Amino acid sequence: MTLPYIPRLLCISLATLFLVHLALGLAVSLIARPAARLGESIRPHLAARFLLALRLLPALGAALIVVVVCLPSYLWLEPEAPTERVGFGCLAAAVLGVAMWVVSLARGLRAAAGARRFLRQCQRVGRPARLPGRRANAGMTAWIVDGAAPLLALGGIVRPRLVVSHGVVDALSPEQLSAALRHERAHWAARDNLKRLCILLAPGILPFEGSSRVLERGWRKFTEWAADDRAVAGSARRSFALAGALVRVARMTSDVSPAPVALLLGDTDELAARVDRLLRPAPPPAGPRPILALSAMVLMAVSLAAILQPAALYSVHLALERLVE
């Protein structure tokens, strides 16, 4: 197919985005399980950040390479290129790139719309209320809804809304309810709902292929651990209260809320590990050494400087020319 300058540039950019994302996604998938195991040896909030960065790396890395490397090389070396032919391989990769992002955006927007409808429904049938630990949960609006279902969820990204069912309020002691609210407050402080939405918006390796379940499950686990740690703040009494709240809510009939909404129980498959961790707290694992983070930053800066050299841009341009053929 023969395309003019701008459509050709768009086609090349989309094809490059798909191919780079595919390469980075495959590389991340190879290290996903070791990375999840590595998270066990560091603090939960750092492990959650690490796995989140790995999950978003293919999408962000591909976008960065297209914007910083591919576009400058094309605009510099072909500023006024005439109409040229684009091969089938480039067109196919561009179509897959469009499909990849359309599917992921639709998934994220559908989940966000479902969460919005869920919160609006809760606000219609519920009523605002003051709950234990009001000072610790300042900034969050709490709504109590009728029903015995074990609903304790934090919804919203900009303006968080806490939804609690009468069943949870009646089942938990004041101390347990306060610990549970502190847990949801920790989710809000960490902006976990926003991170959930980013994960949903990030595409999988292929357009209709599921995302990295290992990284996402590990991220959810360490996110809950981090919220538990912030909620108890080293207090054995709060640890026992939160563990008791988890067990009591788990024994009730569970309803699933749409993402991105933070539920008290989180991933129920990890509930036993959370309770055991709260009842038998271990010494906190060591954090990463500053020299490792500094080395990673220096390596990234050196790599980016090397890529932006004229010789490197020329090599990228030759690769793009082969892609178009």
Image (tube, helix red, strand yellow):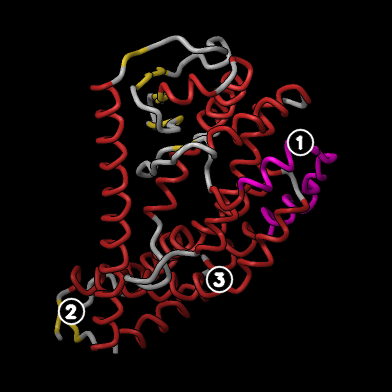
Residue ID for mark 3: 29
Between the C-alphas of marks 3 and 1, the distance is 34 Å
Q: Position of residue 239 (x, y in %)?
A: 72, 28
Say which residue label 1 marks. Answer: 279
| Relative image position of residue 18 (x, y in whole percent) | 37, 72
Q: Which mark is in front, 2 or 3?
A: 3
Tell me the amino acid under the disc marked 2: Pro
Residue 273 part of the magenta-drawn span? yes
Question: Residue sitting at 31 percent across and 67 percent down?
Answer: 100
**What crowding class fits label 2: few (fewer than 14 Cα within 10 Å), some (14-19), or many (20 or more)?**
few
Type of the residue with mark 1: Leu
Judge the density around disc 3: few (<14), some (14-19), many (≥20) Cα neighbours within 10 Å: some
Circle 1 SS class: helix
Residue beneath the point at 18% across and 79% down: 82
What is the three-letter code of the residue carrying label 3? Ser
Label annotation for residue 211: none
Q: Which of label 2 and label 1 is nearer to you? A: 1
Between the C-alphas of marks 2 and 3, the distance is: 40 Å
Q: Earlier in the sequence, mark 2 or mark 1?
A: 2
- Residue in the picture at 41% in, 83% down: 318
Q: Residues within 10 Å of mark 1 (few under 14, many from 20)?
A: some
Mark 2 or 3, nearer chain start: 3
Query: Which region shows up in magenta?
Result: 271-299
Residue 297 sits inside the magenta stretch: yes
Work out whether residue 15 or residue 37 is closer to the camera in this orientation and state it: 37
Residue 82, numbered circle? 2
Residue 163 vs 115, above or below: the answer is above
Q: Could you say which quadrant of the image residue 165 lies in? A: top left
Q: How far is disc 2 from disc 1 in space, using C-alphas?
A: 70 Å
Dot 2 lies on which element?
A: loop
Residue 89 figure quarter = bottom left
| Image quadrant where one finds the C terminus | bottom left
